[in-house]
């Protein structure tokens, strides 16, 4: 059993997980019974665990496939981490990456979809980003990403483990996809939980580091201050080092960290003694103009999601929803 968010202290929190797990399952079930159906096909992308499994890049992958097939998708999401959902970092990131795709943000995704339709926004299908537990909106396809390094059979629910709901919830999924490396025994155990084998496997591929204008730069031998307010910041560090960069400083940040003025000043001081500030696309979208006048170059890693196996089956399953 892997440690949960509390690390070695997670074992002490197991009694709380015994309460949280059944409560979360019942809440999800109640919402599912009152689910609202909108008049366009809905494809949900989600996961069982907290933390980054590549949901947002996966959403953009599916959106690209839908566009290639002649459809007009929209993205709907909670807009977590901001008082105004439309100002949330992941919302901004989607809009920057997919400027021709409507991004609808708000806690009630059915309401946001119907509101956009009344306002004349053009789309013929919707992809939900982080929608597996948002069962109050009916969907036509539920795809769940499973982190290969945190298989559901090897952990428990919050707060002792990483799961948002009991692992048996995977049975609600129409399909599940492995994100990152997963051993054969864990694949078999997850397949037993889900009642089906994985449909596909995806992995994040480092595509170099770029300026905000899109020009590629080399990090070889460069001393970098790293800003990574994401769920798995260690992945940025590892990729940067593998590319030849030197991590001069990497102050810890929480996922969706708003980065206060004082915190930003800390990064500015650290950057003045380094060659560059390297920050994720999510952080760059969150900070926007606050990075103007930075004392050293600002660089953004570009990471793409690659389907390493099962692409044809996954693409067919997604497109079948609109046939």
Image (cartoon, rainbow, N blue to C red):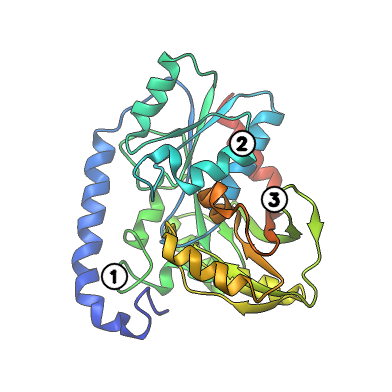
Checking the image for residue 136, the label placed there is none
Q: Residue furthest bottom?
A: 8
State whether residue 187 is above or below residue 47: below
Residue in the foreground of this view, choosing between 312 and 28: 28
Q: Earlier in the sequence, mark 2 or mark 1?
A: 2
* 242 relative to 279 in the view: left or right: right
Residue in the foreground of this view, choosing between 246 and 167: 246
Which quadrant of the view contains residue 99? Answer: top right
Give the spatial CA distance, label 1 vs label 3.
37 Å
Q: Which residue occupies 60% across, 53% down?
A: 281
Q: Earlier in the sequence, mark 1 or mark 3?
A: 1
Residue, disc 2 = 63
Q: Which residue occupies 64% across, 56% down?
A: 202
Q: Specify few, some or many for label 3: CA neighbours under 10 Å numbering under 14, 14-19, or 20 or more.
A: some
Residue in the foreground of this view, choosing between 141 and 74: 74
- Whether residue 88 appears in this view of the structure is yes
- Whether residue 309 appears in this view of the structure is no
Q: Where is residue 166 drawn, in percent x and y?
A: 32, 61
Give the spatial CA distance, label 2 vs label 1.
33 Å
For the residues bearing labels 2 and 3, Cβ distance under 8 angstroms: no
Q: Secondary structure at mark 1?
A: loop
Q: Specify few, some or many for label 2: CA neighbours under 10 Å numbering under 14, 14-19, or 20 or more.
A: many
Checking the image for residue 159, the label placed there is 1
Count of picture labels: 3
């Amino acid at each position: 059993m892997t440690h949960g968010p509390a690390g070695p202290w997670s074992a002490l929190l197991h009694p709380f997980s015994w309460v949280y797990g059944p409560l979360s399952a019942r809440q999800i079930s109640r919402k599912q019974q009152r689910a609202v159906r909108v008049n366009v096909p809905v494809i949900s992308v989600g996961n069982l665990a907290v933390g980054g499994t590549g949901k947002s890049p996966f959403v953009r992958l599916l959106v690209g496939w839908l566009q290639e097939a002649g459809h007009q998708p929209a993205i709907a999401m909670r807009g977590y981490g901001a008082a105004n959902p439309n100002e949330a970092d992941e919302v901004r990131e989607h809009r920057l990456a997919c400027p021709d795709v409507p991004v609808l943000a708000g806690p009630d995704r059915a309401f946001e979809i119907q509101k956009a339709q009344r306002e004349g926004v053009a789309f013929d299908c919707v992809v939900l980003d982080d929608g597996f537990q948002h069962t109050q909106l009916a969907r036509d396809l539920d795809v769940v990403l499973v982190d290969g390094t945190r298989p559901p059979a090897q952990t428990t629910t919050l707060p002792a483990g990483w799961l948002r709901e009991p692992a048996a919830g995977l049975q609600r999924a129409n399909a599940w996809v492995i994100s990152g490396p997963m051993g054969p025994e864990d694949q078999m155990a997850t397949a037993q939980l889900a009642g089906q084998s994985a449909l596909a496997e995806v992995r994040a591929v480092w595509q170099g580091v770029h300026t905000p204008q899109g020009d590629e730069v080399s990090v070889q031998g460069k001393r970098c201050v790293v800003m990574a307010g994401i769920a798995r910041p260690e992945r940025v560090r590892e990729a940067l080092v593998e590319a030849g960069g030197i991590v001069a400083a990497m102050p810890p940040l929480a996922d969706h960290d708003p980065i206060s003025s004082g915190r930003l000043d800390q990064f500015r001081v650290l950057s003045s003694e380094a060659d560059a500030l390297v920050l994720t696309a999510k952080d760059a979208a969150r900070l926007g103009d606050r990075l103007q006048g930075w004392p050293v170059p600002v660089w953004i890693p570009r990471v793409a999601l690659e389907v390493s196996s099962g692409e044809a089956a996954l693409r067919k399953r997604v497109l079948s929803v609109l046939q």
